[in-house]
Image: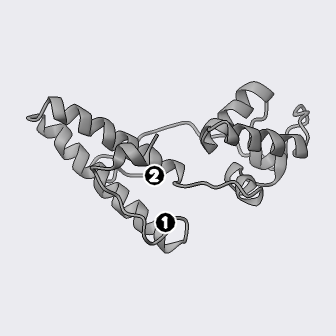
């Protein structure tokens, strides 16, 4: 995939091997995994952190293959409230970090431009999530309130 705000090509990366079934060496049961996912969410972990914890701690390489559903689908079916999606939270954290950097280094023009690009990504992604009903229509990104939106 190409870069969004540059004329360069995208980053290269490894791809996960294509598997259609859960590996035989995974011993965790579906009900146990769902209970563990709910417990980890109640501890305050994000969906990505839950997947990492299951991979490293329980040896579950892919939650979707083990349970038939993704981590967020399991959390929604159990009634857990997910306020802001993980990708939007990551972008807001990056914007917050750049804002604190720019308070100390006001003449750092390249990072000021980077902040503008990140904030435009936040606005585009929030528009997408509002159209698909993930975020409420009243949700608004504000650069002044970013510390309050992301813990």
Q: Of the two numbered discs 2 and 1 on the same chain, state the one appearing first in sequence.
A: 2
Say how many tags the image has: 2
Residue 3, image x and y in percent?
34, 50
Identify which residue is drawn at 25% across, 39% down: 99
Element type where label 2 sits in the image = helix
Q: What is the number of the mark on residue 88?
A: 2
| Apparent side of residue 45 relative to residue 11 in the rendered image (left or right) | right
Apparent side of residue 67 relative to residue 112 in the rendered image (left or right):
right
Horizontal placement of 24 versus 57: left or right?
right
Q: Is residue 15 above or below residue 87?
A: above
Whether residues under marks 2 and 1 lie with C-beta atoms below 8 angstroms apart, the answer is yes
Q: Is residue 139 above or below residue 55?
A: below
Choose top left, top right, bottom left or bottom right for residue 43: top right
Per the rendering, the mark at residue 129 is 1
Q: What is the secondary structure assignment of the residue under circle 1?
A: helix
Neighbour class for label 2 at 10 Å: few (<14), some, many (≥20)?
A: some
Instruction: Compare residues 133 and 11 and report the one nearer the observer.
Output: 133
Taking the spot 45% from the left edge, 52% from the top edge, the residue there is 88
Identified at 62% across, 38% down, the residue is: 44
**Which residue extends farthest top?**
57
The x, y position of residue 122, in whole percent, is: 36, 56
Residue at 36 percent across and 40 percent down: it is: 94
* Percent of width and height locating residue 29: 91, 41
Q: Where is residue 48 drawn, in percent x and y?
A: 61, 41
3D distance between C-alphas at marks 2 and 1: 9 Å
Residue 78 in view: yes
Q: Give the class, few, some or many, for how many residues have Cα within 10 Å of label 1's Cα (few <14, many ≥20).
A: some
Task: Please indicate, yes or no, whether residue 10 appears anywhere in the rendered image.
Answer: no
């Amino acid at each position: 995939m190409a870069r969004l705000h540059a004329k360069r090509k995208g980053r290269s990366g490894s791809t996960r091997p294509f598997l259609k079934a859960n590996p035989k060496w995974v011993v965790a049961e579906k009900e146990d995994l769902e209970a563990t996912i709910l417990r980890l969410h109640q501890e305050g972990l994000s969906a990505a952190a839950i997947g990492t914890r299951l991979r490293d701690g329980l040896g579950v390489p892919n939650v979707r293959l083990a349970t038939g559903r993704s981590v967020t689908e399991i959390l929604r079916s159990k009634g857990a409230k997910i306020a802001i999606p993980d990708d939007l939270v990551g972008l807001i954290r990056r914007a917050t970090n750049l804002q604190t950097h720019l308070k100390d280094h006001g003449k750092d023009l390249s990072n000021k431009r980077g902040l503008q690009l990140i904030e435009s990504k936040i606005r585009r992604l929030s528009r997408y999530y509002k159209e698909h009903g993930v975020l409420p229509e009243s949700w608004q990104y504000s650069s002044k309130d970013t510390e309050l939106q992301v813990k």
